[in-house]
Image (cartoon, rainbow, N blue to C red):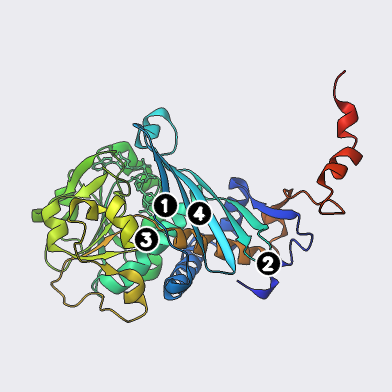
């Protein structure tokens, strides 16, 4: 966190708030590709500081329709959490599958220093995290990515892989052709070579990297073992909740498995299909150079992404630091969020003096 990061709210009761509209203005000001790179740097830095973080699997409230989750963490200086849902059925009702907002606070005072929308920010941080993993796990000469699931997350994934890894050939598949057409329309002018496929198997054929980012609240089998050739890196993003997976078990067993935080991935990831003590590799160790990533050109690597709280913390930290840059004053508003009585013990007196008590209807 930059030294200047508490300058905006010198008055500690004022909290900068980044709305959806502000987030779009921030993207317009900074550029989406720059933000994906910037967030990837913060995600990577925070993986390197892994032991400093309070870590817990996210707190999930499940229903038949979906899940609502809280994702808290702290590095000792700052505390952050995200509220996020995952409701695959929402799409059919014209609603988002995933929506989110988040908070960053100072541990020293416990006062919040940022409120932010995180529906858009989650798409950015998920794509940035996918690329951080792929940097260590995909073959260096990778050019072609299969993108299976062309919904809300998909364009962000594609742009992050292009910007940071030079992936410019895409093989698209979605059970809903409208989603694929939406993707193609949105990605015009970015210089992708795009092949539309009629099955996941066709999309996977010849791909160096396969990203699965589908939404279905079931143990789906989007990718089977026979669809994946030697040397492929799989970026499995969609399976992120108990009872919701995308890969055939044989494929998960064949691949070298890389995860964010094992206690959470064992509950939520493709890993939920395997024994509770199945050995995995942790990304933070790979990023710190303590563990090998890809070991050969023929190995199949699997990033079993579920999304961990430190990645949201990194994204919030990135946004908070950007607000201190020159020219960012219109990119947030100040919220009067924290009661601030002259005498901290006289909260009641502050309410009384405001005249609120005398306004009660007789
Ligand atoms: P979305 O609903 O916008 O898009 C999902 C797409 O998958 C839809 O276009 C749908 O038609 C397609 N699809 C469903 N079943 C399919 C199948 N069998 N084959 C091919 N396509 C299929 O959802 P989204 O916001 O893009 O999120 C996608 C998934 O990613 C969700 O499950 C979400 O929970 C997950 N997610 C994970 C992370 C993470 O950090 N790992 C972060 C965000 C979202």
Q: In this view, does 306 lie above or below 142?
A: above
The residue at which mark 3 appears reads as 191
Q: Tell us which disc is closer to us: 4 or 1.
A: 1
Image region (quadrant) for ligand 1: top left
Q: Quarter of the image holding residue 348?
A: top right
Q: Is residue 228 visible?
A: no
Circle 3/circle 4 CB separation < 8 Å:
no
Image coordinates of residue 74 in percent, x first then y, are 52, 64
Tag 3's secondary structure?
loop
Q: Which one is closest to the eye, mark 3 or mark 4?
A: 4
Gap in angstroms between the C-alphas marked 1 and 2:
30 Å
Q: Earlier in the sequence, mark 1 or mark 2?
A: 1
Residue plotted at (43% across, 75% down): 48
Whole-number angstrom distance, CA of label 3 to CA of label 4:
24 Å
Tell me what residue is drawn at x 48 percent, y 72 percent: 52
Label 3 with label 1: CB-CB less than 8 Å? no
Instruction: Sort mark 2 into few (<14), some (14-19) or many (20+) by Cα contacts within 10 Å.
Output: some
- Which structural element holds mark 2? loop
- Split into 4 quadrants, where in the image is the N terminus? bottom right
Q: In this orientation, which residue lies closer to the viewer: 80 or 195?
A: 80
259 with respect to 325 (left or right)? left
Residue denoted by label 1: 58
Between 55 and 14, the residue placed more toward the observer is 55
First in residue order: circle 3 vs circle 1? 1
Which label lies toward us, 3 or 2? Answer: 2
| Residue lying at 41% horizontally and 28% vertically, measured from the top left | 93
């Amino acid at each position: 966190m930059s030294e200047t990061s508490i300058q905006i709210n010198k008055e500690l009761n004022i909290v900068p708030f980044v709305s959806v509209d502000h987030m779009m203005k921030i993207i317009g000001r900074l550029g989406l590709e720059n933000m994906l790179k910037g967030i990837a740097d913060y995600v990577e830095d925070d993986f390197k500081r892994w032991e400093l973080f309070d870590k817990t699997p996210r707190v999930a409230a499940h229903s038949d329709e979906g899940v609502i989750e809280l994702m808290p963490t702290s590095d000792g200086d700052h505390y952050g959490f995200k509220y996020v849902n995952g409701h695959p059925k929402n799409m059919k009702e014209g609603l988002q599958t995933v929506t989110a907002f988040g908070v960053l606070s100072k541990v020293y005072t416990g006062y919040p220093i940022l409120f932010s929308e995180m529906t858009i920010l989650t798409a950015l941080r998920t794509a940035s995290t996918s690329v951080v993993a792929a940097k260590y796990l995909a073959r260096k000469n990778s050019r072609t990515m299969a993108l299976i699931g062309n919904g809300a997350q998909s364009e962000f994934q594609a742009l992050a892989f292009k910007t940071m890894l030079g992936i410019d050939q895409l093989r698209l598949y979605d059970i809903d052709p409208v989603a694929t057409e939406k993707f193609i329309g949105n990605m015009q002018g970015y210089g992708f070579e795009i092949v539309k496929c009629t099955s996941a198997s066709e999309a996977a054929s010849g791909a160096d990297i396969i990203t699965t980012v589908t939404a279905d609240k079931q143990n789906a089998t989007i990718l089977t073992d026979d669809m994946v050739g030697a040397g492929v890196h799989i970026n499995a993003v969609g399976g992120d909740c108990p009872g919701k997976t995308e890969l055939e078990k044989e494929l998960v067993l064949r691949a070298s498995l890389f995860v964010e935080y094992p206690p959470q991935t064992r509950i939520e990831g493709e890993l939920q299909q395997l024994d509770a003590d199945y050995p995995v590799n942790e990304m933070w160790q790979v990023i710190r150079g303590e563990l090998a990533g890809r070991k050969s050109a023929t190995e199949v690597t699997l990033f079993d992404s579920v999304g961990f709280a430190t990645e949201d913390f990194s994204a919030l930290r990135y946004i908070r630091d950007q607000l201190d840059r020159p020219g960012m004053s219109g990119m947030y508003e100040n919220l009067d969020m924290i009661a601030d009585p002259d005498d901290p013990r006289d909260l009641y007196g502050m309410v009384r003096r405001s005249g609120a008590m005398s306004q009660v209807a007789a």
